[in-house]
Amino acid sequence: MSRIIISVKELHKQYGDFEAVKGISFDVMEGEIFGLLGPNGAGKSTTLEIIETLRQKSGGKVLVDGFDLDKSPNEIKKIIGVQLQTSGFYPSLNLVELITLFAGLYNEEVDPLLLLDKVNLRDKAKAKFKEMSGGQKQRFSIATTLINHPKIIFLDEPTTGLDPQARRNLWDLIRDIRSKGTTVIITTHYMDEAEVLCDRVAIIDSGKIIALNSPDKLIDELVATGFERPKEVKRANLEDVFIQLTGHALREA
Ligand code: ADP
Ligand code: MG
């Protein structure tokens, strides 16, 4: 039985009069890939950023690896990896320069090329950030979350806007990171992605958790209510066609 690495209890977030997060509770187990799903504005990023110590909560209790967010935010910062907005990367620095810059901020000794190996970007070591494809930028930003050897990484919509090949490549990378023992919390709008990638998901709507379970169990629960798809399900979908025709290989000219 794995242990709880993040515990969120009755979390509230108020932006002025507007309550964006309305008392949500969930636990994340060590070593799992945990998904936060929900429509735009549901409160996913707010929730993540509170746990990441980047936003103040209005109420509730958060423990990260036993550290209380109210008492020990600096201890929490040391053990988490946060994906920065890619707009925050200096566009004219190359990848090695950017890693060196971030490592300095974290006060960590890092071999930039070894880190780039982890995300399959060694051959781009001297490329400028602005010269990379969308998928490469995302892979690089995931690499930066690993600089401080975190126990937990937070990925907020890492695959939004990527083509199917780049999306699959990122799934492999995320699984690889998890297989080395890192806990992953991810938000996504893509249900196929959550289904194949996440061990458990919480579905958030208007600041409340309306379901929390493994994708498999959530689907079984729906089927048990007598739900049937309106149309007969084909054995493949258009994305299967696309991948079959264009291959799994990454296109990153
Ligand atoms: P999600 O990531 O699920 O799309 P967010 O957590 O970004 O949702 O936002 C939740 C709600 O809170 C949205 O209605 C959003 O407009 C609002 N919100 C987010 N940040 C702020 C802010 N700094 N000030 C006021 N309202 C905000
Ligand atoms: Mg968001």
Image (cartoon, rainbow, N blue to C red):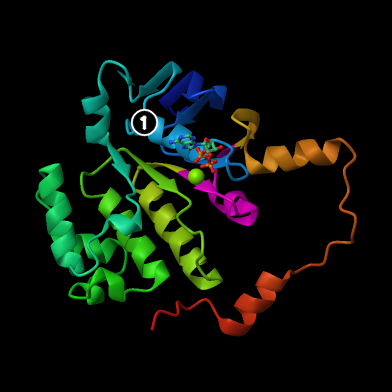
Residue indicated by mark 1: 55
**Residue 153, how many percent across, how many down?**
36, 43
Q: Is residue 245 above or below residue 74?
A: below
Tell me the quarter of the picture where residue 152 sits: top left
Q: Is residue 45 above or below residue 122?
A: above
Q: Is residue 194 magenta?
A: yes
**Residue 40, how many percent across, how many down?**
59, 45
Q: Is residue 231 magenta?
A: no
Relative to 227, 240 lies left or right: left
Task: Please tell me which residue lies in front, 88 or 81.
Answer: 88
Q: Residue type at mark 1?
A: Arg
Q: Residues within 10 Å of mark 1 (few under 14, many from 20)?
A: few
What residue appears at the point 90 percent right and 39 percent down from the top-left corner? Answer: 226
Tell me the quarter of the picture where residue 148 sits: top left
Tell me the quarter of the picture where residue 63 sits: top left
What residue appears at the point 57 percent right and 41 percent down from the top-left corner? Answer: 41
Q: Which residues are magenta?
A: 186-202
Q: Is residue 186 above or below residue 30?
A: below
Q: Quadrant of the C terminus?
A: bottom left
